[in-house]
Structure formats: structure tokens, C-alpha cells
Image (tube, rainbow, N blue to C red):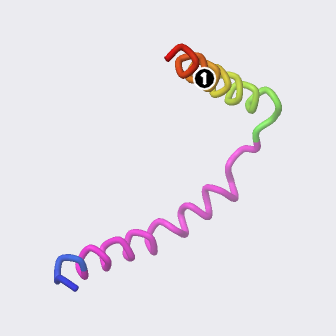
Amino acid sequence: MDWMQIIWAVAIGAMIIMFLPRAKYMVENSPKGNLKDWMGFILPIGAVVLFVILLIALV
């Protein structure tokens, strides 16, 4: 194992250790989505999926 790989592994490990408590706090205290929020997410994703299927079918 190269010394640069060891340094990168330590740096990535330190970032995970530092970000994990904050991420846990954000997940616990985030607002919950209702049906309107989910439909605002699902409709554009569905439109993109249908558009990609159309493009594939045209090829």
C-alpha cells in the first residue's frame, strides 16, 4: 500500500467521523414530506423516465 493511499484512507475516515453526528441530527430533525411534496418529486422523475424511454424507442 502506497503512503498516499494511507493518507487518503485516513482523510476519508476522518471526514466520515466528523460528518456522521451532524447527518444524524439533520435526519432526525428534518421536516416530514406530505403527499404534495412526494408528487412534486415523482412527476418530474416520471416525465424524465418516459422521455428516455421515448428516445430509446426512436433509435
Residue at position x 25%, y 82% from top? 6
Q: In this view, does 25 lie to the left or right of 39?
A: left
Residue at position x 38%, y 69% from top? 15
- Mark 1 surroundings within 10 Å by alpha-carbon count, few (fewer than 14), some (14 through 19), many (20 or more): few
The verdict on residue 31 being magenta is yes
In the orientation shown, which residue stands out farthest toward the left?
3
Span shown in magenta: 6-32
Q: Is residue 4 left or right of residue 47?
A: left
Q: Is residue 27 above or below residue 9?
A: above
Magenta part, dominant SS: helix
- The image shows residue 10 at horizontal and vertical percentages of 31, 79
Res. 18 image quadrant: bottom left
Residue at position x 82%, y 31% from top? 35
In the orientation shown, which residue stands out farthest toward the top?
58
Residue at position x 17%, y 83% from top? 3
In the orientation shown, which residue stands out farthest toward the right?
35
- At label 1, the amino acid type is Ile
- The image shows residue 47 at horizontal and vertical percentages of 64, 20
Q: What element carries label 1?
A: helix
| Label 1 sits on residue | 53
